[in-house]
């Protein structure tokens, strides 16, 4: 009797673990990736953590590496209302936007993604998430059926599950992501470039 009770307990425990997983598994892209590509990115210059005041955002540096290596077109997400130049003030605005699930307006006309097979999507990690202006882009441009290759910069928070957020929000097939310290992208560009090229090779992108 005791043996059967133990087996039943283990079975219920395994079932509970399965249930905690929740939701459908995200779709992962398999190599090689081919076709016309577009690099979409949001990047903020001015004062940043670990690098001080900068003229070119950390994520933009990676976006340019990718565009040059792949021959992809580029689209920069530009908020209609710029974030404060000071780092602390910018983080406070970003936190408020996240708490309100805001959708900041974007300047310009959205790209026609129907012309592209692969979308490289870049962003900094803000409060363990993508900046809310990236979700504005997702609302305006339908990426379902596309392959999205995420890349991000951070100062210690890592990817923060943002590849999963992208898959859930867009319905796109998502590749393995590139995540890099902003300090590396900004201060050790040769090393950052080689790491970016290695990632492109790993996910199997071919022109």
Image (cartoon, rainbow, N blue to C red):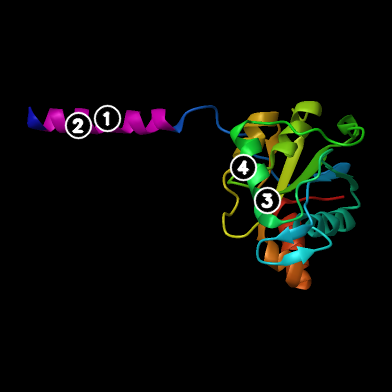
Q: Percent position (x, y) of residue 143?
A: 77, 30
Q: Is residue 32 left or right of residue 156?
A: right
Judge depth for marks 1 and 4 and give the one in front. 4
Question: In the rendered structure, are the residues bearing label 1 and label 2 in contact, judged by CB atoms less than 8 Å apart?
Answer: yes
Mark 1 or mark 3: which comes first in sequence?
1
* Mark pair 2, 3: CA separation: 56 Å
Badge 4 crowding class, 10 Å Cα cut-off, few under 14, some 14 to 19, many 20 or more, is some
Image point (68%, 51%), residue name: 89
Point out the frontmost of discs 1 and 3: 3
For disc 4, the marked residue is 95
Question: Label 1 crowding class (10 Å Cα cut-off): few <14, some 14-19, many 20+?
Answer: few
* 175 in relation to 54, above or below: above
x 65%, y 34%: residue: 167
Gap between marks 1 and 4, in whole Å?
42 Å
Camera-nearest residue between 5 and 93: 93
Confirm whether the magenta stretch covers residue 14. yes
Of tags 4 and 3, the one toward the viewer is 3
Q: Are marks 4 and 3 in contact (CB under 8 Å)?
A: no
Mark 1 vs mark 3, CA separation in Å: 51 Å
Asked if marks 1 and 4 touch (Cβ < 8 Å), the reply is: no
The residue under the point 76% across, 34% down is 104
| Residue indicated by mark 1 | 11
Label 3: few (<14), some or many (≥20) within 10 Å?
few
Q: Where are the magenta residues, as a range?
A: 3-20
Q: Which residue is mark 2?
A: 7
């Amino acid at each position: 009797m005791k043996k059967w009770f133990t087996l039943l307990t283990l079975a219920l425990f395994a079932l509970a673990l399965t249930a905690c997983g929740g939701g459908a598994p995200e779709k992962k892209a398999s190599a090689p990736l081919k076709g016309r590509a577009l690099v979409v990115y949001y990047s903020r210059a001015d004062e940043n953590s670990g690098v001080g005041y900068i003229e070119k955002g950390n994520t933009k540096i990676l976006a340019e590496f990718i565009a040059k290596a792949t021959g992809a077109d580029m689209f920069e997400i530009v908020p209609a209302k710029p974030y404060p130049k000071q780092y602390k003030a910018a983080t406070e605005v970003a936190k408020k936007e996240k708490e309100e699930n805001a959708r900041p307006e974007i300047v310009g006309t959205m790209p026609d993604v129907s012309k592209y097979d692969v979308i490289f999507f870049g962003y900094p990690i803000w409060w363990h998430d993508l900046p809310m202006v990236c979700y504005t882009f997702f609302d305006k441009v339908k990426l379902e059926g596309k392959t999205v290759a995420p890349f991000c910069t951070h100062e210690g928070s890592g990817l923060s599950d943002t590849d999963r957020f992208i898959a859930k929000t867009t319905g796109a097939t998502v590749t393995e992501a590139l995540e890099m310290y902003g300090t590396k992208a900004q201060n050790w560009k040769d090393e950052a470039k080689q790491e970016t090229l290695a990632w492109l090779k790993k996910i199997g992108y071919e022109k």
